[in-house]
């Protein structure tokens, strides 16, 4: 399984430079460029940890073979845009169904398929829910100035983490 971001839709970071500087109690402008550069990095790390998009994206997942219903890698899902099997476009409710809400179950009508590509759009999480975790992660990145990051930011985000996919949430 491979996952590719096709586009990011209307990107607005969940935290602003002003919010980060208030959180860090910084009053000068000396590090503004650096802080602005780590905000998207913190969001991306949080998205990977959560298995959920914080900002809306269109994604495409590739599967060598599907033999059972699956959940998509990233959520929350707003639409399934297209499904192709071995290059042939499938039709919703005829060739496949999508059941559920935030992280729906995708089911093929046939028992198995090879070379499956599914394009879908995520709606993004409510940024107010994850803002404390992202602020904590930005603070750790700012203070450490290295790739080694401690884990206390995860405690803010763990209530929103999606565990697994492929039929298990």
Image (cartoon, helix red, strand yellow):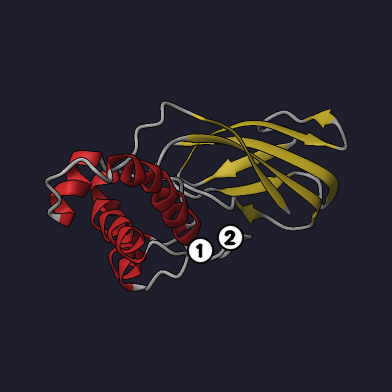
**Residue 26 placement (x, y as % from top left):** 15, 50
- Label 2: how many residues lie within 10 Å, few (<14), some (14-19) or many (20+)? some
Q: Quadrant of the N terminus?
A: bottom right
**Residue 32 placement (x, y as % from top left):** 27, 41
In this rendered view, identify the residue nearer to me: 92 or 44.
44
Looking at the image, residue 76 sits to the left or right of residue 166; the answer is: left
Quadrant in the picture for residue 82? top right
Residue at screen point 26% across, 51% down? 131
Q: Is residue 74 above or below residue 147?
A: above
Looking at the image, residue 158 sits to the left or right of residue 122; the answer is: left
Quadrant in the picture for residue 25? bottom left
In this rendered view, identify the residue nearer to me: 24 or 133.
24
Label 2 vs label 1: CA separation? 6 Å
**Residue 106 placement (x, y as % from top left):** 63, 47
In this rendered view, identify the residue nearer to me: 26 or 8.
26
Which structural element holds mark 1?
loop
Q: How many labels, in total? A: 2
**Residue 64 placement (x, y as % from top left):** 83, 52
In this rendered view, identify the residue nearer to me: 133 or 164.
133
Q: Are marks 2 and 1 in contact (CB under 8 Å)?
A: yes
Residue at screen point 41% across, 39% down? 55
Badge 1 is on which residue? 169
Residue at screen point 50% across, 56% down? 48
Q: Which mark is residue 71?
A: none
Which structural element holds mark 2?
loop
Residue at screen point 51% across, 63% down? 169
Badge 2 is on which residue? 165
- Label 1: how many residues lie within 10 Å, few (<14), some (14-19) or many (20+)? few
């Amino acid at each position: 399984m491979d996952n590719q971001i096709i586009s990011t839709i209307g990107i607005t970071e969940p935290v602003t430079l002003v919010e980060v500087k208030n959180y860090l109690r910084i009053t000068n402008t000396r590090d503004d460029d650096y802080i602005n550069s780590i905000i998207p990095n913190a969001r991306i790390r949080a998205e990977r940890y959560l298995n959920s998009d914080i900002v809306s994206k269109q994604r495409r997942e590739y599967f060598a073979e599907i033999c059972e219903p699956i959940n998509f890698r990233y959520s929350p899902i707003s639409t399934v845009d297209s499904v192709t099997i071995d290059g042939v476009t499938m039709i919703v409710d005829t060739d496949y169904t999508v059941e559920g809400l935030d992280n729906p179950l995708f089911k093929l009508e046939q028992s198995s398929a090879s070379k499956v590509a599914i394009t879908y759009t995520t709606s993004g999480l409510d940024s107010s829910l994850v803002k404390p975790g992202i602020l904590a992660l930005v603070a750790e990145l700012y203070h450490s100035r290295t790739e080694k990051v401690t884990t206390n930011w995860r405690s803010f985000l763990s209530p929103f983490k999606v565990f697994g996919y492929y039929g298990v949430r």
